[in-house]
Amino acid sequence: MTPSERLCINCHVPMVKAAMNYKGLKFEARQCPKCREKIFTEELTMKAISQLEKNRLEPKYTKQPIKIGHSWGVTFPKEVADVFHLGNGKTKLVMHPNVEKNRIEIVLE
């Protein structure tokens, strides 16, 4: 048995890959071939959460920069702030300006 295989807690047989549908999305799970019990491993749960958060966000947000004193700022939509925990107080944003590509990349640290 490989580390990725799980035994059914009821039947003690190896579980197999299965798919579950939730809110129109398909998620990978594990299912017992005997009793049909389905489970999510921690890894599969984290993938499912990431997929749900990704689908919650718009593919593109258009914002206008705002003047703050002698600097410029940008606001983030609530759903983006929630997913990336911007209200945390410990979250740091690192900016990488790329003049050649006319981009400003913002990365979480």
Image (spheres, rainbow, N blue to C red):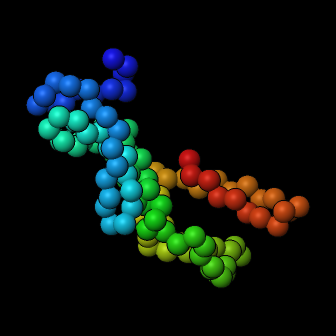
Q: Which quarter of the picture shows residue 38? A: top left
The image position of residue 3, as x and y in percent, is: 36, 21
Q: Residue at x 43, y 68 (%)?
A: 56
Reply above or below: 78 against 94.
Answer: below
Q: Residue at x 20, y 25 (%)?
A: 13
Q: Residue at x 65, y 58 (%)?
A: 106
Image quadrant where one finds the N terminus: top left
Q: Is residue 42 visible?
A: no
Q: Is residue 77 visible?
A: yes
Question: Residue most toward the right?
Answer: 100
Question: Residue most toward the top?
Answer: 1
Reply above or below: 57 against 13.
Answer: below
Total residue callouts: 0
Q: Which quarter of the picture shows residue 61? A: bottom right
The image position of residue 69, as x and y in percent, is: 66, 78
31 relative to 59 in the view: left or right: left
35 relative to 22 in the view: left or right: left
